[in-house]
Image (cartoon, helix red, strand yellow):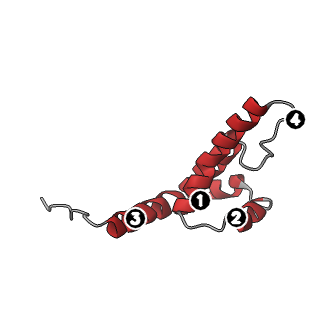
Amino acid sequence: MTKKKKINKVGDKALATFEDYQRTFGSPYGRRVLWHLMKVHGFLENSHVPGDSHSTAFNSGSRDVINNILKKMKVDIPAYSKMLSNYDPEEEYDVFDQ
């Protein structure tokens, strides 16, 4: 059994985390999960609820889940949001046909 390399430095941990996010959300499966999370957390919707600051704050916090994932992946969030307007997660289900 081989031992896993221990990560000591902050930079090494950040790089390992970045690579983990890339592996997780960079595959067709991960993109579908990310798309689902975006829908569930209202990432592509306006978080503002007129006259209801509590709901606005809740919606903003929910959207931050996705923002944090995209930041960990070093994604340009405005460009990614624009790209999603043409994204169809159903197209990625072709991976099951292989």
- Please say whether residue 97 is visible from this viewpoint: no
Question: Left or right: 4 with respect to 31?
Answer: left
For marks 1 and 4, the one nearer the N-term is 4
Which amino acid type is shown beneath numbered disc 1? Leu
Comparing labels 3 and 4, the label whose residue is closer to the camera: 4
Residue 17 location, quadrant: bottom left
Which residue is the site of mark 4? 50
Q: Label 4: how many residues lie within 10 Å, few (<14), some (14-19) or many (20+)?
A: few
Q: Secondary structure at mark 4?
A: loop
Residues tagged 2 and 1 counted as in contact (Cβ below 8 A): yes
Residue assigned mark 2: 80
Between marks 3 and 2, how big is the CA–CA gap?
22 Å
Marks 1/4: CA–CA distance:
27 Å
The image quadrant that residue 4 belongs to is: bottom left
One can see residue 2 in this view: yes
C-alpha gap between disc 2 and disc 4: 27 Å
Residue identified by numbered label 3: 14
Q: Residue at x 39, y 68 (%)?
A: 15
Which numbered tag is attached to residue 70?
1
Do the residues bearing badges 1 and 3 touch, measured as CB atoms within 8 Å?
no
Type of amino acid at the residue the image marks with label 2: Tyr
Picture quadrant of residue 5: bottom left
| Neighbourhood count class around disc 1 (C-alpha, 10 Å): few under 14, some 14–19, many 20 upward | some
Quarter of the image that includes the C terminus: bottom right
Counting other residues with Cα less than 10 Å from the Cα at mark 2, is it few (<14), some (14-19), or many (20 or more)? few
Residue 51 x, y percent position in the rendering: 86, 31
